[in-house]
Amino acid sequence: MYDLLVVGSANADLVIGVERRPAAGETVLGSDLAVHPGGKGGNQAVAAARLGARTALLARVGDDAHGRLLLDSQREAGVDTAGVLVGGAPTGVALITVDPSGDNSIVVSPGANGRLTPGDARGAAALFRAAQVVSTQLEIPLETVVEVVRNLLPHNRFVLNPSPPRALPQEVLAACDPLIVNEHEARVLLGAAPGIEPEEWAAALLALGPRSVVVTLGAAGSLVADADGMTRVPSVRVAAVDTTGAGDAFTAALAWRLGLGESLAVAAGYASRVGAAAVTKAGAQESYPTAAEVEALR
Ligand code: RIB
């Protein structure tokens, strides 16, 4: 049995620290290059497993050194990688710049992630049967996310972080419980004028059809919303070193705790502490806390 099945991307993160992220037409000098295991799907799987969740990953990597780096990182964290397919294209790569405030800019070359097909999702029926919660993001083809939704079983709870954001079909929106967005993702899903307050975004997002919504607000925590109402959930204060992958850690922790039966607000409180811990160290997967480290962060 799995607490969480993550269907999503796996990227090698090529990271350069910079004093200032470059503007259009600008060249800046940065730090030495660091290569970290990443990708929103791979990050979620490692984050959940490190917390103690029984986790499986359905993804595709290339038959290359980056693919092996990513598989090693998953296995070291305790993720079941039987669903990780190998070959078809080079492993996905993310080019990341991180500035001294910990903020980043990311460009992704999807590579093998783009070859994770609807047929691959259909072929993973055994993983769906064994999983409590199924989580995806949008660094894999949208047709594959649609197929994931069509293959959900009655006992599967579906969690989606639409990142990078794009318009979503109604059948995907209706399956989300919750849809997890940051401000940027909310604005893309809602169009030009979503309102000023996160409560307005959450109401407008709920009107699109998901069963519940979580709006992440960075250091301000998150807002959870469903048919029963809305609740602001605070975060803990930490000094940010690198925000890369913090949202993935939040999503993974939230998905896991919801599968354990916690309410949306309680699960979001726990996930906020996981996300906060993740910004205190460099890289994505290397920055993820154990359950004991989360307990210490009160
Ligand atoms: O969310 C962070 C992730 O986005 C990075 O690990 C990078 O691979 C991109 O997918």
Image (cartoon, grey):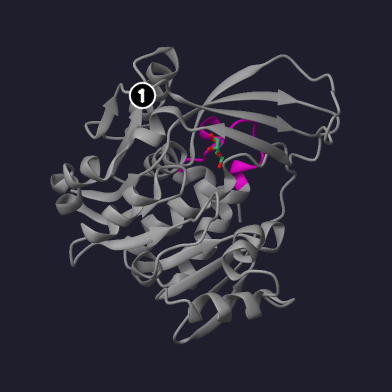
Q: Main secondary structure of the magenta part?
A: loop
Query: Magenta stretch containing residue 2, yes or no?
Result: no
In the image, is residue 18 above or below residue 55? above
The residue lying at 66 percent from left, 58 percent from top is: 184
The residue lying at 66 percent from left, 42 percent from top is: 243
Query: Magenta stretch containing residue 289, yes or no?
Result: yes
Q: Position of residue 192 (x, y in %)?
A: 69, 70
Residue to which mark 1 is pinned: 71
Mark 1, ligand 1, within 8 Å: the answer is no
Can I make out residue 225 in this image?
no
Q: On the rendered structure, is 257 left or right of 195?
A: left
Q: Position of residue 89 (x, y in %)?
A: 37, 22
The residue lying at 43 percent from left, 67 percent from top is: 178
Q: Position of residue 79 (x, y in %)?
A: 31, 35
Amino acid type at circle 1 is Leu
Span colored in magenta:
277-290
